[in-house]
Amino acid sequence: MVNFETLPNRKDTRSLKWDRLEDMFGSKDIQPMWVADMDLEIASPIKSALIDRINHGVFGYTLTDDQLNDTVRKWLIKQHNWEIDPNWLIYSPGVIPTIHMTILTQTKPGDKILIQTPVYHPFHSLIKSHQRELVTNPLIYQDGRYTIDFNDLEQKFKTGVKVLLFCSPHNPVGRVWTKDELTKVVELAEKYNVLIISDEIHADLTYAPHKHIPLGSLDSPISKQIISCFAPTKTFNIAGLQVSYAVIPDKELRNEMVNAFAKYGMNSLNTLGITALEAAYQSGNEWLDQLKSLLLTNRQLVEDTFSDRDEINVVHAEGTYLIWLDCRKMNIRQSELKSFMEEKAKVGLNNGITFGEEGRGFMRLNIASPTSYIKEGLDKIIYALDHFES
Ligand SMILES: Cc1ncc(COP(=O)(O)O)c(C=O)c1O
């Protein structure tokens, strides 16, 4: 039986979420609800596989093989109805390293790379770190829901964008893009010859009736121009094991990426990452089903908590375990919103502005923890709203 009720003690485990509170929020007395990992124990089949592998006692260099490819292939069919050729797979320690490598191999300094803001904060910094030009296509936020501004996207593509860095499902706004939306994205990319990096790390975490559709699975002539990035790390809470993969149908593009990873000495995975990936995809389904039901409970709790509060609106998450809180009606500056959460409510959320200018007035809340823990954090926010001048 999966235990999602007990909060694991993660303090002093070199946890980014728990052991950097003072640096991040200026105090240790903060309830962390920020970085995207879960305060939940992993699935027992993964744990057993890791223990068995550790008991083997030898940890030399690794390789990936047909058996692993086949496990991934079957996962993509079962979860996302996408039949890939296993030869299209390449592995990497993370989605972010794959994005870096794509930028390095497929663009040059000054080239335009487009993101749809507000979006996962490293997208901004990694483009700038390579001296590429960051182009934004802000999402439209209307009636509490985000959509893509296709007119603006086309205008921006016309200016000579080389790469679209696409986030699907979208962090932090929680959208699971529909087939219609995805089709329009690919059609425009084809028309303007734009390469797409499709970051689908949150693919497995969607809530009915919303269903993730891999961009590369669309029947389109440019599916060859898509690098689709996936990982078991968000889904199964194994981010510290650093394992991910990309699906790249085009042989030339794939070889360029493989050679680049080799050039930078990043062409093998760590033993435990491989072991966990395989166990997760072969035997993690029961745990994943229960996780989704916990996340649904927690999402409901957040929505109910703020349903009769004017100050904070909850953007309904169709996927991901990240909830985007619209706090604009609090009518305070971003720095005051941050201090309100940290100093008055004593909760550590992600600051909306780090996701782009469009995140001003917003905060991101991580709900992948036991329900009692989420409730405790929400109670603190409500108490602060009721007792302090914001
Ligand atoms: C959209 C998105 N991409 C990538 C990552 C990180 O990927 P990785 O740890 O595989 O580099 C995250 C983590 O939160 C994310 O939300």
Image (tube, rainbow, N blue to C red):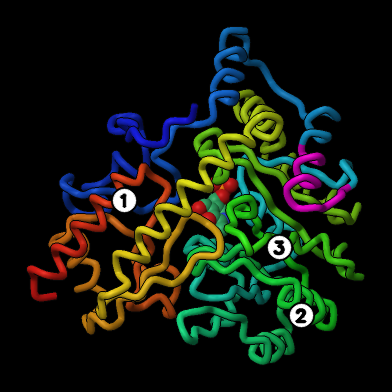
Mark 1 or mark 3, which has the lower sequence index? 3
The relative height of residue 57 versus residue 187 in the rendered view (above or below) is above
- Graded by Cα atoms within 10 Å as few (under 14), some (14 to 19) or many (20 or more), the crowding at tag 2 reads few
**Residue appearing at x 71%, y 62% in the figure:** 197
Q: CA distance from mark 1 to mark 2?
A: 37 Å
Element class at badge 2 = helix
Report the amino acid beneath label 2: Lys
Q: Position of residue 348 (x, y in %)?
A: 27, 55
Residue 226 drawn at (x, y percent): 79, 62
Disc 2 target residue = 184
Res 269 → quadrant: top right
171 up-or-down from 136: above or below = above
Q: Quadrant of the C terminus?
A: bottom left
| Quadrant housing residue 112 | bottom right
- Looking at the image, tell me whether mark 3 or mark 2 is earlier in sequence order: 2
Q: Which residue is identified by label 3? A: 197
CB atoms at circles 1 and 3 under 8 Å apart? no
Q: What distance separates the C-alpha of mark 3 from that of mark 2?
A: 16 Å
Residue position marked by numbered label 1 in the rendering: 374
Residue drawn where x is 75% and y is 59% of the image: 214
Q: Is residue 382 magenta?
A: no
Residue 64: x percent and y percent? 77, 29
Type of residue at label 1?
Answer: Ile
Q: Nearer the viewer, residue 1 or 45?
A: 1
* Bounds of the magenta segment: 72-84
Q: Is residue 145 left or right of residue 303?
A: right
- 216 vs 41, nearest the viewer: 41
